[in-house]
Image (cartoon, grey):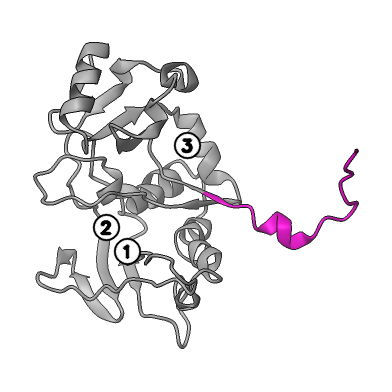
Amino acid sequence: MVTRRPKNPPALAARSVKTEAYPYTAGSTGINSGIFDHDWQKKFGISYGEIEWPPTGSRFTGKEMWDEYRARYRDGIIIIHVMKEEWVEQALSHPMVMVASDGMPISSLTERAHPRGMGCFARVLGRYCREKKILSLDEAIRKMTLMPAQRLEKFSPAMRRKGRLTIGADADITIFDADEVIDRATYTEPNQYSKGIIHVLVGGTFVVRNEQLVEGVFVGKPVVSNRAGASKVSIR
């Protein structure tokens, strides 16, 4: 049987295809992730030397060290230096790609992890928007705010109040200096706050004021799915 493509496929189907990326040439995941259960070296074109152990910043030296750490640190997180800069630029400039940090929680500012948790969005604004001009400022902001909110609106009606400045929307606002904003977080020092983020409000309450974190303020709320049995989606 031959299946023919319709001459005029529904426009909605084309618009529903989206993905996300973060502005780094390294990814991060659990050391026991299923992606390492098969021939990952051939699949990703890398070997042990491209995998970093964040607590020490050291790279894996071979299969013996790899097997030992996978057995000893079953919940350990690793950083995989696998991407090329041109891939990142191509992804960020594509109209169907949103920006997301994919950051993982850390227990303290002394814990070493991927710098995306601290620097993702400032890096887009500073490095890829202002310096490299891969994106316009308007497009960069849209990819980090409105576009993700619109993508999740059917999943959670609460997202209709996110990602935009309008009457009735949640007052989640970031005020930054477009001429100064840049990330400071690195792989060796990942817990450095970004430069140029002046104020951040969540639900109308300051959580960053005059470039300083407001201590003891925890006003973020989970975004809940409207689907029965679905888990909460943490947005703020």
In the image, is residue 75 part of the stretch drawn in magenta?
Answer: no
- CB atoms at circles 2 and 3 under 8 Å apart? no
Image-based side of 98 in relation to 214, left or right = right
SS of the residue at dot 3?
helix
Q: Nearer the viewer, residue 128 or 70?
A: 70
Position of residue 110 relative to residue 60, above or below, is below
Residue 3 is one of the magenta-drawn residues: yes
Amino acid type, label 1: Phe
Disc number at residue 176? 1
Quarter of the N terminus within the rendering: top right
User: Residue 47 at x, y = what percent?
Assistant: 36, 15
Q: Which of the two discs, 1 and 3, labels the residue nearer the N terminus?
A: 3
The residue closer to the viewer here, 76 or 108, is 76
Q: Position of residue 234 (x, y in %)?
A: 34, 64
- Of helix, strand and loop, which one carries label 2? loop
Q: Quarter of the image containing the C terminus?
A: bottom left
* Kind of residue at badge 2: Gly
Q: Residue at x 72, y 55 (%)?
A: 14
Q: Which residue is mark 3?
A: 88
Q: Main secondary structure of the magenta part?
A: loop
Give the x, y percent position of residue 170: 39, 80
Q: Quadrant of residue 203?
A: bottom left
Element type at mark 1: strand
Q: Which residue is mark 2?
A: 196
Q: Which residues are magenta?
A: 1-19
Tell me the kind of residue under disc 3: Val
